[in-house]
Image: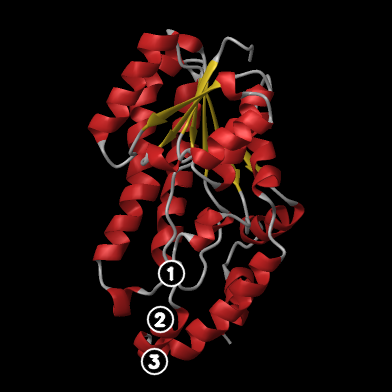
Amino acid sequence: MTAERTVLITGTSSGIGLAAAVGAARAGLRVVATMRDTAKAGPLREAAAEARVADRVAVKRLDVVDAGSVMACLGEVIDEYGRLDALVNNAGAGYVGTVEQDGMDPVRATMEVNFFGVVEATRAALPHLRASQGRVITVTSVGGVVGQPFNEAYCAAKFAVEGFMESLAPVAATLGVHVTVVEPGAVASEFVASQELDVPALLEAAGPYAPALRAYIERATKTFTSAQTPDEAAAPVIAALTADRPPFRVQTSDWARDFTGTKLADLDGSAVQSLTGSWVG
């Protein structure tokens, strides 16, 4: 992809999205870095300036759960640059909880952002990507391959994204559009902090699930102390943007490859259940 080609990345105010936006610009791409609230663009602008790529990073508002916002942003991109060569679906939201205790509203909200938002952005971008023979790159998660305790809604959404993209990929390929999913494990970023978990309150409200939830939180806390940096997790996104023929699926670390490999080789499900069961006691 040359310096004149344009990539739109969602969810760039922090974490992988911010790192991917700066990394793509450093790779010579013209980047449209989008976020729901452009008042939060300060860290991205600072990082782009420090990397000396501020002239190749344009910040725009895009809310993936608002179809009008998606179409308006894409319209601006085409009006200003004349083309779209890649879409990076990165915007997402985490959720920790279990359905009996929390009800359906959090499940629907999590699906709306992490699944339907991805579908909406992809649907709207495809006519432009067909014209440019471009690509769709979606940041999913190892949680899109292996279901994880107290992440029912989040993993359900990421499973749905993986199934959607795996089904779309051969269809899009007939028209010259490459589809890739990128699966990070734990990443040290604002994604975790943004969930604003009140652990004592969660445990108090968990009722009979409290012992399992406590064990899970203790394990998750240890995992994120040795997490990848956003730059490390974003590197496969940049590789997928610049490769001649990117793979369909790529993990961001050896740990993520081993973890997802457990599921992919687990025909009866016993290995995954044994592994994740140990997380909750």
Q: Is 118 placed above or below 28 here?
A: below
Q: What colour scheme has been applied to the protein in the rendered image?
A: secondary structure
3D distance between C-alphas at marks 3 and 1 = 16 Å
Residue to which mark 1 is pinned: 96
Where residue 15 appears, as percent x and y from the top left, is 57, 47
Disc 1: CA contacts within 10 A as few (<14), some (14-19) or many (>=20): some
User: For the residues carrying marks 3 and 1, which lies nearer the camera in this image?
Assistant: 1
Q: Residue 177 in the image: x percent, y percent?
A: 50, 20
Identify residue type, mark 3.
Pro
| Residue 225: percent from left, percent from top | 69, 67
Q: Quick check: can you spot residue 248?
A: no
Q: Quadrant of the N terminus?
A: top right
Q: Earlier in the sequence, mark 3 or mark 1?
A: 1
Q: Secondary structure at mark 2?
A: helix
Q: Report the residue marked by disc 2.
A: 202
Q: Residue 170 versus residue 76: which sits nearer the camera?
A: 76
Residue at 48% of width from left, 82% of height from top? 213
Task: Please state which of the two labelled residues, at mark 2 or mark 1, is closer to the viewer.
Answer: 2
Q: Residues within 10 Å of mark 2 (few under 14, many from 20)?
A: some
Q: What's the CA distance linking mark 2 and mark 3?
A: 12 Å
Which residue corresponds to mark 3?
208
SS state under label 1: loop
